[in-house]
Structures are given as structure tokens and as C-alpha cells.
């Protein structure tokens, strides 16, 4: 530009600016076109067909014992019961004495109970949880106690030395055997459907009167649980006046319920950790 004649500089300068603007515009348009092409190529490469079936990955699920316990607890919590837990290693007092079991009761025998070297034992039922709860809580009480229990049983198709129980307890003023029957019937029908139910007179040290409950399952009467009105001596042991309060209790083995509900023929299948079996549930 410095070598141009002064009269030509404005014209040449204007032309130079026009060319510069055109080149800049062309570069911007080309840059934008290349960016769009790159984006489209990336979208095509990363495209996901949402109509394609997903890749299956095996999922874990609840063991049939745990699912049975959860189902039972859902029913009882819906009836107003509170879930309580307690230690699996118990003293003789909580496992036997406080439950009105005399010193000569067969359940105290070495052949039936796992005694420990320190004088304690492995609980034979979850009724001990009920005693502990009654010591800590004033009536009215509605509690359900699930847990693992231990008995010196020979292991076979229907027995195990370690199994699971669920026990329920209600203590309040004016509770009667009719209240017990209504609660048991509601629980059984929620689990098994609208089946015939019968109560048979029985005996348990911590309830009086006591009964066993059967359901008509697949054409046969099947025993499913034991129950009864809390013995006054049990109420006295926890400082509860039996003249004012009454209560009822019921207990049953979870394995029995799981076997019936799922059509199992051998309780040992529940502990074998055989995935071919467990994946059915």
C-alpha cells in the first residue's frame, strides 16, 4: 500500500477490505460446516437403538426363608405389631424359668438343648425375646419376634438343629381367646388363603389354655402353629398384674411354612446353597 499512488490507495484499500471480509466469512462458514459434520458423525457413531432388547445381568434375590419371614412380618406389622429381636445366646432364666418351665421339664434336658460351658445356652425358641420386651415395656404390648433357634434334633427331611421361628405376643386389658383366634385366623388366611382352620386343645408351659392350629391343606389337616393365653405366672415374672392384664401368644417354624407354601419335600434343601434350587424362587 505504501508504494501505491495516493489517489489509488482508497480504492485499493477498499478492495482489500472486501477480499479480507469475504475470506473471513468463507472460513467461518467452512469451520461451521466442518463442526456440524463432525457432530453428525459422532452422533451416528454413538447412536443407541432404544428399541433393542437390554442385556440381561443376573440379579440376586431373597432366600425363600427370608422372603417367607418378610411376608409374615408384613402381615403382622399391618395388624399393629412391632418387630423385636433378642440375643441367640440366652440364660436359663429367659429361656426356661421366666416362661414357667419347671426344672424337670423335658426341654431342659441335655439331649434337647445346646448348653454352653459358661452356663448359658443357645435359645430353643424366640419366646425369650417376649420376656425381655415385657420387662422393658408397659402394656399394651403388640410384639412379633422372628429369629434363629437351636435344638438338638437329628437332621432329616423335616427336622434341623438350627431353624427359624416367629412368635407373636399381645398383652392388654381384656384380651380373650377370641382375640387370639381372630389374629391367628387373619394370619393363616393371609398366607394360605381362605382355608378351613381348626384349633385343637394342647399344652404349653407358658400358655393356659393352649391350642395347636391346623389348616386343611391339599386335602389333609396340617399342623402349622401353637398358641394360647399367656399363663398368669409368666405375667407375674415380668411384673405385670394378671388380675389387670391378659395376653395371648403364638409361635411357628418358618421352615414349615416355607415348605408348605413352596411345595418342598426336604427341609435340608433350604440350607444346601444349591443355586439350581434357589433360583426357582
Image (spheres, rainbow, N blue to C red):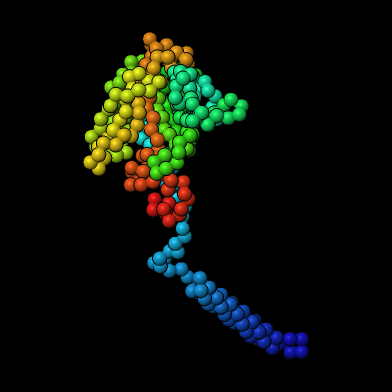
Q: Look at the picture and state if 163 lies above or below 231.
A: below
| Residue in the image at 55% along x and 29% along y | 115
Query: Residue 176: x percent and y percent?
Result: 31, 18
Query: Residue 147: x percent and y percent?
Result: 47, 34
Q: Look at the picture and state if 92 lies above or below 276.
A: above
Residue 136: tell me if it is visible: no
Q: Give whichever of 127, 132 is nearer the camera.
A: 127
State the image quarter where residue 107 is shown.
Answer: top left
The count of marks equals 0
Q: Give whichever of 126, 244 is nearer the camera.
A: 126
Q: Give whichever of 193, 1 is nearer the camera.
A: 193
Query: Residue 238: x percent and y percent?
Result: 47, 16
| Residue in the image at 39% along x and 50% along y | 281
Q: Look at the picture and state if 14 lies above or below 81.
A: below
Q: Give whichever of 206, 136 is nearer the camera.
A: 206
Outermost residue toward the right in this view: 3
Residue 196: tell me if it is visible: yes
Query: Residue 152: x percent and y percent?
Result: 48, 34
| Residue in the image at 27% along x and 27% along y | 199
State the image quarter where residue 38 is shown.
Answer: bottom right
Quadrant in the picture for the N terminus: bottom right
| Residue in the image at 45% along x and 50% along y | 61
Task: Locate residue 193 relative to residue 245 in the image: left or right.
Answer: left
Outermost residue toward the top in this view: 243
Task: Locate residue 178 relative to residue 12 in the image: left or right.
Answer: left
Amino acid at each position: 500500500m505504501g508504494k501505491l499512488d495516493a489517489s489509488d490507495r482508497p480504492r485499493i484499500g477498499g478492495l482489500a477490505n472486501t477480499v479480507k471480509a469475504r475470506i473471513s466469512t468463507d472460513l467461518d462458514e467452512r469451520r461451521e460446516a466442518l463442526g456440524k459434520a463432525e457432530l453428525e458423525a459422532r452422533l451416528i457413531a454413538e447412536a443407541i437403538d432404544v428399541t433393542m432388547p437390554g442385556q440381561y445381568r443376573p440379579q440376586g434375590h431373597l432366600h425363600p426363608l427370608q422372603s417367607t419371614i418378610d411376608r409374615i412380618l408384613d402381615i403382622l406389622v399391618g395388624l399393629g405389631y412391632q418387630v423385636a429381636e433378642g440375643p441367640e445366646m440366652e440364660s436359663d432364666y429367659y429361656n426356661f424359668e421366666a416362661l414357667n418351665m419347671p426344672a424337670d421339664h423335658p426341654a431342659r434336658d441335655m439331649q434337647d438343648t445346646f448348653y454352653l460351658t459358661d452356663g448359658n445356652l443357645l435359645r430353643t425358641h424366640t419366646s425369650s425375646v417376649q420376656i425381655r420386651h415385657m420387662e422393658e415395656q408397659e402394656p399394651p404390648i403388640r410384639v412379633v419376634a422372628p429369629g434363629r433357634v437351636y435344638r438338638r434334633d437329628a437332621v432329616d427331611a423335616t427336622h434341623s438343629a438350627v431353624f427359624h421361628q416367629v412368635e407373636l405376643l399381645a398383652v392388654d386389658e381384656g384380651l380373650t381367646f377370641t382375640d387370639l383366634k381372630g389374629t391367628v385366623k387373619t394370619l393363616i388366611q393371609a398366607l394360605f388363603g381362605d382355608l378351613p382352620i381348626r384349633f385343637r386343645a394342647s399344652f404349653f408351659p407358658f400358655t393356659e389354655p393352649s391350642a395347636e392350629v391346623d389348616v386343611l391343606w391339599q386335602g389333609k389337616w396340617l399342623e402349622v402353629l401353637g398358641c394360647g393365653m399367656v399363663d398368669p405366672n409368666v405375667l407375674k415374672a415380668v411384673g405385670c398384674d394378671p388380675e389387670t392384664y391378659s395376653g395371648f401368644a403364638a409361635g411357628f417354624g418358618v421352615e414349615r411354612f416355607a415348605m408348605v407354601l413352596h411345595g418342598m419335600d426336604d427341609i435340608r434343601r433350604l440350607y444346601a446353597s444349591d443355586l439350581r434350587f434357589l433360583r426357582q424362587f
